[in-house]
Image (spheres, grey):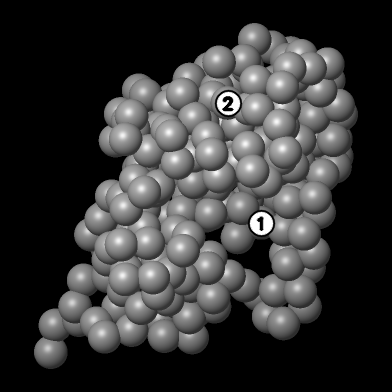
Amino acid sequence: MTRPTLRLYELVLANGRSASPYVWRVRYALAHKGLAFDSVPLGFTEIHTFFAGRFKTLPVIADGATMLAESWVIVDYLDQRYPEKPLFAGAADHAAIRLLDAWLSFEVLRRMLRIYVLDVHDAARPEDRSYFRQSREARFKMTLEAYTADRGERLSRLREALMPLRMQLRQSPFLGGTAPSYADYIALGAFQWIGSVSSLPALAKDDTLLREWLDRGFDLYDGLGRDARLRPLFE
């Protein structure tokens, strides 16, 4: 019996590019496991109505009658449902990568948001921009312009916050060691996100360790991360 093709519901920008860091980590996880999928692109304002309020964020994955949201829920399901080519080397590895994800969210993604959220707005589909602005400005209690006004100063702190990645990459070609792991997919997803929208390169031109790792990561799985629509990540 033929297995139904998985469907991945992805958040897309005006140019059709999938941008969410959480979608990208699932994209890499599917490629790691050799699982084909059909992409279903959605804009910010389509999510609630498309799923009739069941899901509020993307990614969402459908596997037959099973539909799941949240990237960790999805990857754990994929490893249980399709155990070949596991994403984790055991419970300890799973816990360590959860810790890396928490660190990345707190120390890196928060800083990226403060620098690039206006760029996300500008890159979104025209019909999504009003919703995006209103919802984010209500959360931040200021305009997107005010929220990102000092982003040039914040950029140096973002680069400094990435030092733990560089320290690991001095020891091995991937964050996962000699081969990529879900740790790499989480971090690569963050750079896929800002590379989709950035009007300000995140990295210095001489950041060799991150440049070489990004090249290796973007080349994985027949160039999954390569896209002419990506904006420069390096000065």
- Specify whether 122 is left or right of 169: left
Give the amino acid type for the residue marked by disc 1 in the picture.
Ala
154 lies above or below 131: above
- How far apart in space, not on screen, are marks 2 and 1 (Cα)? 27 Å
26 lies above or below 191: below
Residue placed furthest toward the left? 1
Quarter of the image that includes the C terminus: top right
| Residue placed most toward the observer, 137 or 189 | 137
Q: What element carries label 2?
A: helix
Q: Name the residue under label 2.
A: 118
| Residue placed most toward the observer, 152 or 172 | 152
- Specify whether 26 is left or right of 49: right
**Which residue: 63% across, 17% down?**
201
Mark nearer the N terminus (2 vs 1): 2
154 lies above or below 99: above
Tell me if I can see residue 137 in this picture. Answer: yes
Tell me if I can see residue 179 in this picture. Answer: no
- Specify whether 153 is left or right of 74: right
**Image spot of residue 228 (x, y percent):** 35, 23
**Which residue: 19% across, 78% down?**
4
Residue placed furthest toward the bottom? 1
Give the amino acid type for the residue marked by disc 2 in the picture.
Leu
Q: Name the residue under label 1.
A: 183
**Image spot of residue 206 (x, y percent):** 74, 13
**Image spot of residue 88 (x, y percent):** 62, 72
Crowd rating for badge 1 (residues with CA inside 10 Å; few <14, some 14–19, many 20+) = many
Residue 44 numbered tag: none
